[in-house]
């Protein structure tokens, strides 16, 4: 698995309505620690979400993971109500009317979430456990 950061200037082109929550992680200090690490590593978030419930959202293209029949796989790391939220369109795609529908990979979302948490812990040294 390889993550490719999507800066705010490119976010619109990577936008997908099929991104859904994979996991909400709640641990004291986790959101602040992850926010600081991502800001240091990538700079400005992919989307500017200034508010009390949501203050950052870093979006990545995922390379090296099959999300067939979708051509692209997106992961987001954000905060929501003092929890770290991991989201992805893994197992989802947009139909011709741009409505999200499940794919055959939907049943593997938990496995993908575990793989993503492990990757973030190892590659980005994010303290997710």
Image: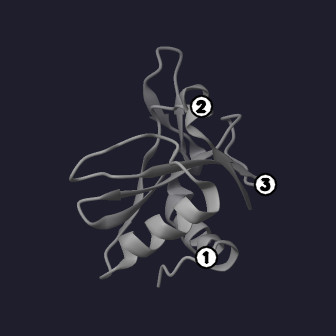
State the residue position of label 2.
9
Quadrant of the snapshot with the N terminus: bottom right
Number of numbered discs: 3
Tell me the tag on residue 23.
Answer: none
Give the residue displayed 67% in from the left and 45% down from the top: 67
To which quarter of the image does residue 65 belong? bottom right
Q: Is residue 15 above or below residue 128?
A: above
Where residue 22 sits in the image (x, y, percent)? 44, 58
Q: Secondary structure at mark 2?
A: helix
Q: Which residue is mark 3?
A: 64
Lower sequence index among marks 1 and 2? 2
Badge 2 local density, few (<14 within 10 Å), some, or many (20+)?
Answer: few
Q: Give the mark nearer the N terminus: 3 vs 2.
A: 2
> What's the residue at 43%, 24% (across, down)?
99
Q: Which residue sits furthest top?
A: 97
Q: Is residue 92 above or below residue 119?
A: above
Q: Quadrant of residue 120?
A: bottom right
Image coordinates for residue 95, horizontal then vertical, percent:
52, 22
Residue linked to disc 1: 118
How many residues crowd around disc 1 within 10 Å: few (fewer than 14), some, or many (20 or more)? Answer: some
Would residue 60 appear left or right of 27 to someone viewing this image? right
**Image location of residue 82, percent across then percent down:** 26, 66
Is residue 123 or residue 71 the one in the foreground? Answer: 123
Callout 1: helix, strand or loop? Answer: helix
Whichever of labels 3 and 1 marks the residue nearer the N terminus, that label is 3
- Residue drawn at x 52%, y 43% is 46
State whether residue 94 is above or below residue 82: above
Mark 1–mark 2 contact, CB under 8 Å? no
Q: Is residue 118 above or below residue 94?
A: below
């Amino acid at each position: 698995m390889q993550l490719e950061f999507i800066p705010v200037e490119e976010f619109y082109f990577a936008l997908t309505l099929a991104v859904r929550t994979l996991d909400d992680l709640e641990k004291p200090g986790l959101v602040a620690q992850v926010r600081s690490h991502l800001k240091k590593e990538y700079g400005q978030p992919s989307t500017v979400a200034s508010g009390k419930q949501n203050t950052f959202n870093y979006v990545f293209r995922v390379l090296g993971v099959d999300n067939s029949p979708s051509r692209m796989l997106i992961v987001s790391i954000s905060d929501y109500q003092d929890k770290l939220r991991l989201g992805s369109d893994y197992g989802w795609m947009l139909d011709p009317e741009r409505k999200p529908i499940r794919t055959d990979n939907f049943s593997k979302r938990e496995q993908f979430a575990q793989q993503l948490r492990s990757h973030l812990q190892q590659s980005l040294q994010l303290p997710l456990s």
